[in-house]
Image: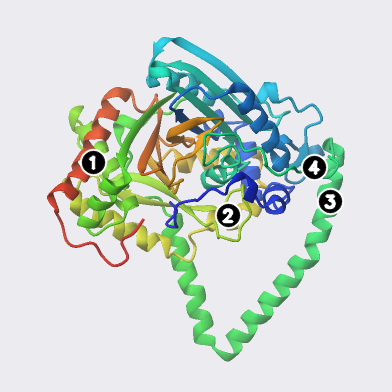
Amino acid sequence: MPDGQPFIPPSAVDVDLSAVGWSMSRTMSDFETMLWRMEETRPELRTPIVAVDVLDRTPDWERLVRAHEWASHIVPRIRMRAVQPAFGLGDPIWSVDPEFDLDYHLRRVRLPEAAGLDHALRVCRHLATEPFDKARPPWMAMLIEGLDDGRAVYVVKTHHSMTDGMGGIQMMTLLHSRRPEPTPDKPDHEPAPPEHLNDLEALGQEVVAEARRTPSRIAGLVSGSARATLTALTRPFDAAGQVLNYVNSLLRVIQPPSAAGSPLLRDRGLGRWFGVLEVGLHELRTAAHAAGGSVNDAYVAALLGGYRRYHEELGVEVGKVPMGMPINMRAASDPSGGNRFAAVRFAGPATEANPAMRIRKVRAMVLALREEPAVDIVEAASPVLVRLPTRVLAEWYLSQSKGLDLQASNVAGVPIPIYLAGARIERVFPFAPTAGCAVMATMVSHAGTCCIGINLDTAAVTEPTLFMRCLQEGLDEVVALGDAGTGSAGSEGARR
């Protein structure tokens, strides 16, 4: 849920090759290792991140292939696979795949005549649910041709251990252009000689890396302990207050939402269903400000309104919604790619029928959670969690995520028109993994339109068409606030 400015893509000639190509760690973080391993024992925890670009025309295939080839040299991670050190000791290491084959990773299909976006989304869904071949770099892309009106769809999926949503947008801009014409003066880049590692060599690198990290960790602990001791001696009440404040925050963060899951959404399975919604960014922002909230507050309130309507349609009493929300922790100085987010959980106010009041309640909850000192506890605890047996770790993680009926993510997208191999990108629909929850909603703003991708677990949501209609009605009632000017004046801090 990033609150920053929209991401402005660089032109191809302005790419910072050193930052894009070499600033990412060769070793997975402990949190990324958790994501990589847990699906081995619980396939419900597979974490493909999917982006669906709707194009105004079919792009030039040869040009698209050349763009991927160029990007794979600019960002070496695109050619890298994850190598697990021997005996499972240590985090996986990214190593160039000696058999990298772009034809395997980039594919094309043609739909039956006059097929619509729904048909293309089914193809995207099937691609998303196919497990990654972990002997290869964990990404796939496909051009889907033959949509009505001459349109096409480009879909790409990456493993969550490779990047989060914002990192994915940053990396995808290498394939995008601000103009439809080719860019002949794109910079060339020859990476360092590739290093192909097997599991024993990866273990050796991990041992060396750990030996190098240990002195700095000890120094950090000593320095931190010295500072803490000095604070405790000179300002004992301040030190005690800081500890108590963090402990209280930790207790609030780790406790599950004070809401029971819906009986309608109790089951979980491997089936997935993709649906899409869209709304003008200006319209959603106007509605949000009319109620004193941000775009994100209005978006979440719309989802909760749809959730309530779905239950009413099926004759089930609705309560508060146990839900989660990723919070972007990425700083402007952070390198592209990787994972830099925290997650919060709360009881979504779906029982509130008034959309303006719902927006205000969501805002109050989210602002409080963002300020929690222990908001990044999972990332902080990942060095301990990742050492657990994989099955134990997966069962614990699934027990936490299965308790959520809804997750809502919001990623700032690109505010200007962009092109892919000559075709204009009309919409960008994101689909984050459910990873145990019933419904995963993700919104990306693209050239003035909020594109919302809904990823449903079909064992939980047994009436997906009805659910999408209810979400649309929830979105409509929120947008209507802007038309009517309902609610209090927007607060000074109510922005994206």
Query: Along the horizontal axis of the image, is 335 left or right of 84?
Result: left
Q: Nearer the viewer, mark 3 or mark 4?
A: 4
Dot 1 falls on a residue whose secondary structure is helix
Q: Disc number at residue 155?
A: none
Vertical placement of 263 versus 332: above or below?
A: above
Mark positioned earlier in the residue sequence (3 or 4): 4
- Pinpoint residue 65: horizontal percent, then vertical percent: 65, 26
Dot placed on the residue nearer the N-terminal end, 2 or 4: 4
Q: Amino acid at mark 2?
A: Glu
Left-right relation of 199 to 267: right
Picture disc at residue 190: 4
1 or 4: tag closer to the N-terminus = 4
- Expressed as whole percent of the image width and height from the top left, the position of residue 326 reads 46, 49
- Residue 246 horizontal/vertical position (percent): 49, 69
Mark with earlier residue (3, 1):
3
Q: Alpha carbon of mark 1 to alpha carbon of mark 4: how far?
A: 52 Å
- Judging by the rendered image, the residue that carries numbered circle 2 is 379
| Helix, strand or loop at mark 3 | helix
Residue 218: give x, y in percent of width and height: 76, 69
- Between the residue at mark 3 and the residue at mark 2, the CA separation in whole angstroms equals 22 Å
Q: CA distance from mark 3 to mark 1?
A: 52 Å
Vertical comparison of 412 with 267: above or below: below
Quarter of the figure with residue 198: top right
Residue pointed to by mark 1: 305
Label 3 – label 4 distance at C-alpha: 29 Å
Residue that numbered label 3 is attached to: 207
Q: Which residue corresponds to the image point at 14% horizontal and 53% vertical from the top-left?
A: 485
At a point 56% along the width and 60% down the height, the residue shown is 332
